[in-house]
Image (cartoon, grey):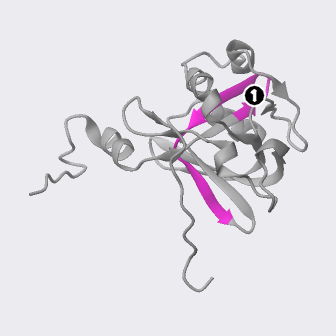
Amino acid sequence: MRTIHTPQDPPAKGLYALLTASIAPRPIAWVSSISADGVPNLAPYSFFTVACADPAILSVTSIGRKDTFRNVVETGEFVVNIGTESLMEVMNATSAPVGPEVDEFALSGLTAEPSEVVLAPRVAEEPIAFECVRHDVIDLGTSAMMLGRVVSVAISDEVLATDGLPDFDSLLPPSRLGRHHWGYAPRTRELPRPGR
């Protein structure tokens, strides 16, 4: 027996709630940007992934036209910061609905560190930051997908493994689940792809 829903006959809490409770865990892009007026902005986004490997392009989807979206459209730059379990509560706090004139770095007590290439600052407390320039913005109706080409990556040596890549057990990135749930880094196992 299965319950069937369609966009015309969604569940009681809506398709958004069903999507986010089913497609989990979702990695979090902690996006820092700067307005055309120079006001720093910081917000977490769980509709996030790698969109292309060559060129390296990250995809972040904004539900609605939020401050981050406006900043990316106006300035063409943003930074995807990768947070850690220890930063989970402050990451969540930066999702508070505040006006565009509010500096979320100052509000949350975080350090806005200058980026290498873009004007948008990165979060000094996080271990990995992908600096991006706008590749494209795709209107999806009530949402917009922001595609950013990676122009610089800053990685803390503390999370690097001997092969030069981030060590998952050192990074411990949180994730978003459904409802108000966040996820801790899960158990992992090594499982090479066939033929590799």
Which residue is identified by label 1? 35
Q: Residue at x 49, y 43 (%)?
A: 143
Magenta region: 32-52
Q: Quadrant of residue 81?
A: top right
- Main SS of the magenta part reads strand
Q: Is residue 50 magenta?
A: yes
Expressed as whole percent of the image width and height from the top left, the position of residue 42 reads 68, 28
> Residue 165's x, y, as percent?
76, 57
Which residue is nearer to you in this view: 161 or 115? 161
Residue for point 80% across, 62% down: 163
Q: Which picture quadrant has residue 90?
A: top right
Residue type indicated by callout 1: Ser
Question: Percent from the top left, x then y, of residue 144?
Answer: 54, 45
Locate residue 132, reporting x and y percent.
77, 48
Describe residue 99's horizontal placement relative to residue 105 as left or right: left
Residue 41 seen? yes
> Closer to the camera, 189 or 141?
189
In the figure, is residue 145 to the left or right of 157? left
* Residue found 81% across the figure and 32% down from its top: 121
The residue positioned 20% from the left and 48% from the top of the image is 8
Q: Is residue 167 magenta?
A: no
In the rendered structure, the answer to whether residue 163 lies left or right of residue 171 reads right
| Relative to 189, residue 145 above or below | above
| Dot 1 alpha-carbon crowd within 10 angstroms: few under 14, some 14 to 19, many 20 or more | many
Q: Quadrant of the N terminus?
A: bottom left
Q: Quadrant of the C terminus?
A: bottom right
Compare residues 37 and 16 and report the one nearer the observer. 16
Q: Secondary structure at mark 1?
A: loop
Question: Is 160 drawn above or below residue 107 in the view shown?
Answer: below
- On the question of residue 76 being in view, the answer is no
Q: Is 167 drawn above or below residue 190 in the view shown?
A: above
- 187 or 94, which is in the foreground? 187
